[in-house]
Image (cartoon, rainbow, N blue to C red):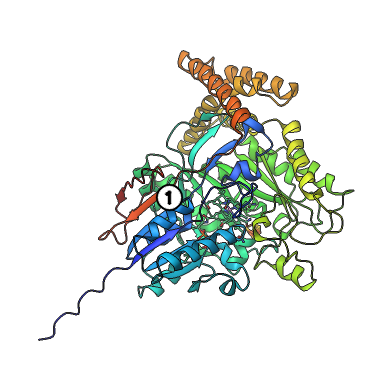
Amino acid sequence: MATAAPALPRKRILLSGVFGPFGVDDEYGRKENIMELFHNQVTKAQGAASWRYHHRSFGLYFLAANVDADVTVLDFPSRRRFARELEKGYDVVGISFIAPNFVKAREMARLAREISPEATIVLGGHGAAIEGLEEQIDCDHVVRGEGIRWLREFLGQDPGAPFVHPVLPSIERRSILGVPVPGVGASLLVPGLGCVNGCRFCSTSHFFDRKYTAFLPAGRDLFETACRIADLRGTDEFFVMDENFLKDTVRARELLAEMERHGRYFRFQLFSSAEAITAFGLDNLVRLGVEFVWIGVEAGGQQGNYAKNEGIDARALVRELRSRGIVVLASGILCQEHHTPDNMQQDVDFLVGIEPDLVQFMLLTPMPTTGLYREHQAKGLLRTELPYEEWHGQKHLAFQHPAFPGDSAERWLQAAFRKDYEVNGSSMLRVVETALRGYRRLADLPRRDACLEQRMRELREQTREWAALLPTIASNAVNPAERRRALGLDRQVAAALGTPSVRERARRVGARTLAAWWRLRLRLFGDGLQPSTIVTRVRPGLAGIASVGMSAAEETAEELRFAAAG
Ligand code: B12
Ligand code: SF4
């Protein structure tokens, strides 16, 4: 009688993000590489009013949730903490990094070879796009593009096994003006990777071969995943990490239909291109529960712009979205090839003048693998002498541009962010304006179905909650114009929603006290914030089960686990 083959031991895998500290000038990094989306490249000039959040290295959790192995995810470790983890002995060490963290990834691979010589070292994430990486970092595999399929194949598992979406918060430690944002915060939803548009500068489109890899291909998949995550985390709000979510209009419509059929209404924060937004329809966005959208406006005119913006009046689009209560982040690209000190101000003024809630300015950067990189490489324009730590688009140009020598690109960036702040006020002020506009628009409708009733209630709540910051915004205003706008808006909110209750008034006092403390903290200790180390262990027997990482203080290295059926 044949005996069953002994089960192969489960692989022990360590998946790690790069080590901190982040956003400091040291031998491994630069002060511009802040581990915060908004403070890094959006609200950075807004002083105490800058939005402060951390985002995890999401890709690691997606890999962990989709393989049958004992996986430990280490997010935001220190170098020492990473080394200590390696001492536990792993079969595979996976390092996720982006190009500006090249030196950190190299040091981590070195440590892995030294401390755990038996381990297979795998490099992945956008940094893997760096040409000739295999010769520059001592590793066993470099994974370019989607990683789940690769890791499953590498482990001898079915690459086409059902996809498991991990249950994760989209952000950690949220505060604005030193005031913690209440509630559990939006959950993360990743419907898929990549974008088919292939704009020549775009890393994410090119890294995934200008194709879209859908994790959740149908509206129904999205709806069911959203229900599961919302039930577990206790919030109906989602940050949708998909480069161009509305590009698949059919799927977005299916999702809306599912929500309406079940009477279950989620709220979404999205990235989408202008053509995709327009094709989906602005009123549909309201029904879908879109509360925030990031749009690549890129430039004011035709020059330096892309097909996705053709025939679209960005100013009107932003106005219409905001009037529907949808917060808009518009991003623009500075120091493009056609820019000179004589014409670039027009693009800065355009971005500021369309009055979005938030503006990102980024320097044109030919990141490895993009069409732009290849073009500049062919023309011999790449600044190959510039270390990768500087390839982040917030200080130096990574290509030769005769019109912007020395530190002029950085000075332009700083002036652009400052101008947006001075002209448009703090983003938080604009966001309260947007919420009130959206609420009024819905409240003024002669008829509302169940979906729009729900959206109106949400906007009313949002306006009320965020308006508590208006007195603090007024006292922290960048100039008298912002102060007047904040006080005027507060009166408008009171007229629309009634005067604040005793509880709300108490919150307002609390907010002002916290903001005063925050300003003092910034003055005395600077504005650096480091994310806490997060350790997530996916244990034996939990294959196919989503893990929910919990924060662990670095020094106590406490490891909390919380698993949920996938
Ligand atoms: C969230 C995010 C952040 C977070 C950081 C989160 C973190 N803890 O690292 C914040 C907001 C702080 C941030 C900051 C910055 N970021 Co960022 N960020 C993103 C963003 C929007 C999403 C990444 C994500 O989670 N995607 C979803 C997951 C599921 O996909 P994924 O990460 O690609 O993972 C998949 C594969 O890549 C692969 N994979 C990933 N890791 C690994 C590891 C292994 C071992 C394997 C096998 C596979 C693998 O498998 C995964 C599943 O398929 C991307 C843009 C984008 N849409 O991807 C930019 C992006 C990654 N960021 C980028 C940059 C440049 C920066 C900044 C320098 C700021 C800036 N100027 O843009 C700073 C640097 C911060 C720092 N000190 O490191 C670039 C990277 C460019 C490049 N070619 O390297 C991107 C692509 C945006 C862009 N400009 O085009 N960022
Ligand atoms: S539309 Fe946006 S996500 Fe798509 S390729 Fe262009 S810049 Fe990238």
Mark 1 lies on a secondary structure that is helix
Quadrant containing the C terminus in the rendered view: bottom left
Q: Residue furthest right?
A: 342
Vertical side of 73 occupied by 149: above or below: below
Q: Is residue 71 visible?
A: yes
Which quarter of the figure has residue 148?
A: bottom left
Q: Position of residue 140 (x, y in %)?
A: 48, 74
| Ligand 1 found in image quarter | bottom right
Local crowd size for mark 1, using a 10 Å CA cut-off: few (<14), some (14–19), many (≥20): some
Q: Position of residue 526 (x, y in %)?
A: 61, 34
74 or 372, nearer to the observer: 74
461 or 70, nearer to the observer: 70
Amino acid type at circle 1 is Glu
Residue in view at x 50 percent, y 71 percent: 139
Vertical side of 498 occupied by 266: above or below: below
Residue in view at x 53 percent, y 24 percent: 464
Q: Position of residue 542 (x, y in %)?
A: 28, 58
Tell me: 489 left or right of 513. Answer: right
Mark 1 residue CB less than 8 A from any atom of ligand 1 = no
Which residue position is annotated with label 1? 258
Q: Residue furthest front?
A: 114
Which quarter of the figure has residue 499?
A: top right
Tell me: 266 left or right of 98. Answer: left
Tell me: 361 left or right of 294. Answer: right
Residue in view at x 65 percent, y 49 percent: 295
Q: Position of residue 428 (x, y in %)?
A: 61, 31
Tell me: 325 left or right of 374. Answer: left
Q: Is residue 211 visible?
A: no
42 or 137, nearer to the observer: 137
Quadrant containing the N terminus in the rendered view: bottom left
